[in-house]
Image (cartoon, grey):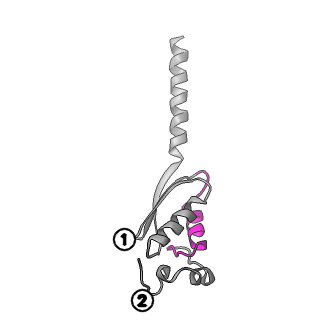
Amino acid sequence: MKTKIFLTAIILGFGITAVFAANKTEKIVVNGNCGMCETRIEKAALTVAGVSKADWDKTTKKLKVTFDDSKTSVETIEIAVAKAGHDTPKHKAADEVYNELPDCCKYRDKNAKTH
């Protein structure tokens, strides 16, 4: 009986470890300027299936994402962010999408006024 309980505990332990092992946290450089950019970037990342947390830092220009790497990848997250109008190291936002951003969010323009 003790052996069965011990084996059950070990199996449950491995199962729990496997569930948590799928969560991964990465930082991605994402261009942006202001609080509106922050909202847009985080929202875009969170639309990706498997992403559980997204936090973009205006100062460092880094998006910290936590995601299930069995459901998505950094590549997929970068594509979603670029589709929202924000460049990443591997994916540039389409000019049409970028041009629709509010003036304060136009990070490619060195003269953009941020708030």
Q: Quick one: quadrant of the C terminus?
A: bottom left
Q: Residue furthest front?
A: 115
Percent across and percent down for residue 84 are 58, 72
Tell me the kind of residue under disc 1. Thr
Residue at image location 55% in from the left, 67% down from the top:
78
Which residue is painted at 53% across and 68% down in the image? 40
Residue at 51 percent across and 42 percent down: it is: 20
The residue where tag 2 is placed is 111
Mark 1: secondary structure: loop
Q: Is residue 85 above or below residue 51?
A: below
* Mark toward the start of the polypeptide (2 vs 1): 1
Type of the residue with mark 2 = Asn
The magenta stretch spans residue 76: yes
Question: Residue 98, how many percent across, how many down?
Answer: 57, 81
Q: Is residue 67 above or below residue 104?
A: above
Q: Nearer the viewer, residue 36 or 59?
A: 36
> Which mark, residue 59?
1
Q: Position of residue 92 (x, y in %)?
A: 56, 78
Which quarter of the figure is the N terminus placed in? top right
> Which numbered marker is on residue 32?
none
Going 54% across and 40% down the picture, which residue do you hit? Answer: 18
Magenta residues, start to end: 70-89
- Disc 2, SS: loop
Residue 21, above or below 102: above
Residue 81, quarter of picture? bottom right
Residue at mark 2 to residue at mark 1: CA–CA distance: 17 Å
All told, the count of numbered labels is: 2
- In the rendered structure, does residue 106 fall within the stretch colored magenta? no
Q: Residues within 10 Å of mark 2 (few under 14, many from 20)?
A: few
Rendered location of residue 37, percent (x, y): 49, 72
